[in-house]
Amino acid sequence: MPSVADILIPLALDSAYSYAVPARLTLAVGDVVQIPLGPRETVGVVWGVRESPSGSNLRPVTGRIEVPPLAGPLRELVDWLARYTLAPKGSALAMALRLPDEAAQGETVRIGVRASGKAPARPTAARLKVLSVAADGTLRGKSALAKEAGVSLSVVDGLIDDGALEALALAPEPVALPPDPDHARVPLSEAQAQAVRDLIALMYPVPAGGAALSLADGLGSPHLPGEGQGEVCEISGEAPHLTPTLSVQEREAVAVPEAQGKLAVGAGDGRPRAPTILLEGVTGSGKTEVYFEAVADCVRRGRQALILMPEIALTAQFLDRFAERFGVRPATWHSGIGGKRRERIRAGVAAGEIAVVVGARSALFLPFTELGLIVVDEEHEAAYKQEDGVHYHARDMAVVRGRIENCPVVLASATPSLETRVNAERGRYRHIVLPERFGGRRLPDIKALDMRSDKPERGSFLAPVLVTAVRETLAEGNQALLFLNRRGYAPLTLCRACGHRYQCRNCSTWLVEHRFRKALVCHQCGYAERRPEACTECGTFDNLTPCGPGVERIAEEVTALFPDKRIIVLSSDFPGGAERLRAELQTVAEGGCDIVIGTQLVAKGHNFPHLTLVGVLDADIGLTSGDPRAAERTFQLLQQVTGRAGRGEKPGRALLQTYQPDHPVIAALLSGDAERFYEEEIAAREAAGLPPFGRLAALIVSATDRAVAEAHGQALARAAEPPEGVMVLGPAEAPLALVRGRYRFRLLVKTERAIDLQSYLRDWIARGPKVRGNVKVAIDVDPQSF
Ligand code: ADP
Ligand code: ZN
């Protein structure tokens, strides 16, 4: 019987297509093949091979492509991703395949030259000089040789043409040298050392049905395909409440093989199930140092480690730190990496030659073969959620990949997401806590400035108390950070004469004035227009008024207040791109500036040892959005940004300008009582049946015609037929009702935890209205804002 291969194509297609396998080919699952698709040839991956009489009617596979096949665990990840997010399986495959992009900038092959032993035709002085340098036989780059000989490149070229120098391709520079786990071990504090012991004990529990494992096992990890309904952090049995750090019994259970037996719950293949571990510690507690030890341990065992970072473009400081500890920089992976280099990293990872990768969320789909550890740094970061194409959360997919590979996953954060906190509290994840800052440093002292009583002067955005605090800080020779999470000069421009407000023509957003660019800009779609001299509505001059502050406007005020101080404004608008921005962050870290004015870009991760004062200009900014996650997000962001103060030798303080000093978020920050905040938020979510206590998905229906989008949303709602335990809300205008010229309506699906959300959604979409014209329906499981 003819052989048929089911080929998954990395395009937005839901299922695999069948092709005949020609007799000359033997194909296996995972093979990458070339196939005809319509009039073109394209690439796909073999998802199944079977014998079928229908084979003779199918178009044949063109041939196999000589690249390593897509390994089983990655195929499993693709299946899982598509099932969980309801994205087309082909789109999920595209994430894992990422074939080198032809258009992407490749590396040019470097050419080296050396003497060939042949005499040159014309022995000029310049030529002889080159040959005398090249006589040592070393293979040098052409320009290096020209430089060393002090001649122009054309002399070297002439000698190559003559045959007196031979040109050879140089081996490309390695993408990453092997890290040395023992390069520069730092002495750890007692708390860190204990955390490292706990971490490593959890990561590598005693083999063969050990109790430690069974603990982890019984406490559950995500369900995988074929195992329950495919949820990220399902519990497979109620667990006793765990104290934040390991209890004595747990430590013993981890350490003493004999204490096992009773608790053991085999993990299928007899191997213990690797756990997910929340490494929680206040800012500056030394979490990085702790998980570096776990990475070192993993490398010593000859296995690979993946460290995920939310904003890879800005992690220069982190890479330096890694290099200090391990002697070399790790391989890095993000969307800015060019085609050739991408391929070499993929190949190095697949061959097991690259031991550590630091990457953005897409690094999760690299073909590791010996994955021994995944670290998700700043696991609470919203940047881990991909908001277009396949809507997936990299932290959750990291947990899934960890389960598939049976490798431990460490989630590190000072302010864990509510989901992760609940998972840790209920024992689904293990929990290690570093309660104090490293080296006895204190957390900054946080105070509120009640803007109702401590009013700024007219036209000013800084309360007098804050101005005084900045002055004191600078007088002591320290740095101050003024934080405002608003880019540009002013978030709204209006005409005082006619009241016209400047709005984007493609989106339902106000245009933000960027004074430096002399433009009004839409932060949603990037649309920009020149800031007009006269109002475009009523034509009068000198009546356009900026309303509210952005960082540029704060910079204007601060410059007037402190004319002789060095002031840096840091936001993603920073001119000169990521390179310049990195240099600027370095300048701040080295104390080369007095006042930093910045958006969330400066809030996270950076170590500014001279910074002792953080002023938050509008602590309430995120609290008014009506999104149930607003409190959590604001708490995390403000905790992060205030945590920038006092990380060096000197103690720090933070001042929050607020109109609601009694708001639970502000109160929690002031009292330093994060526990209470988490408790209250968790209770509120539970009462409302919101994640992680219920499940949630959003359907965004969009079209260029508002009525068409709304009608499609209503037709979907009529087809919803929600069973017991499922609630469908909407359609209502989406929070951003118009984006890039498309009108958006949103349906929210809220279900009880026991409901299989994915199956419900699939059935609903299938019986719902056909998508016509330019209508699009995007499904977002676990939306970040709701
Ligand atoms: P976190 O990741 O928890 O915010 P870090 O790991 O960045 O904390 O540590 C905070 C600061 O303390 C950093 O400047 C770091 O270099 C320093 N530090 C942490 N642990 C040690 C250690 N064992 N020895 C010396 N310095 C340390
Ligand atoms: Zn716009």
Image (cartoon, rainbow, N blue to C red):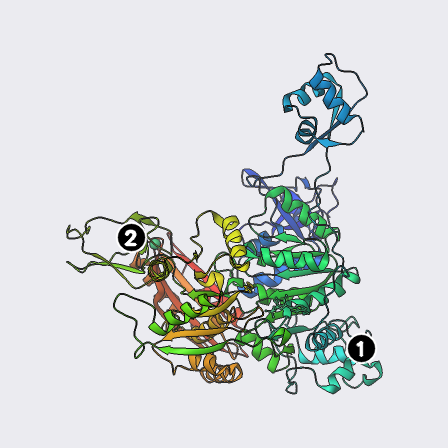
Classify mark 1: helix, strand or loop: loop
What residue is pinned by disc 2?
505
In the image: residue 528, left or right of residue 307: left
Asked if one can make out residue 472 in the rendered structure from this viewpoint, the answer is yes
Crowding at dot 1, Cα within 10 Å, few <14 / some 14-19 / many 20+, comes out as many
What residue is pinned by disc 1?
209
Residue 578 lies, in percent from the top left, at 51, 50
Farthest residue to the front: give it. Answer: 475
Q: Residue at x 64, y 56 (%)?
A: 320
* Amino acid type assigned to the residue bearing label 2 in the image: Arg
* Amino acid type assigned to the residue bearing label 1 in the image: Gly
- Picture disc at residue 326: none
- Residue 599: name its quadrant: bottom left
Q: Quadrant of ligand 2?
A: bottom left
- Residue 234: name its quadrant: bottom right
Whether ligand 2 has any atom under 8 Å from the Cβ at mark 2 is answered as yes
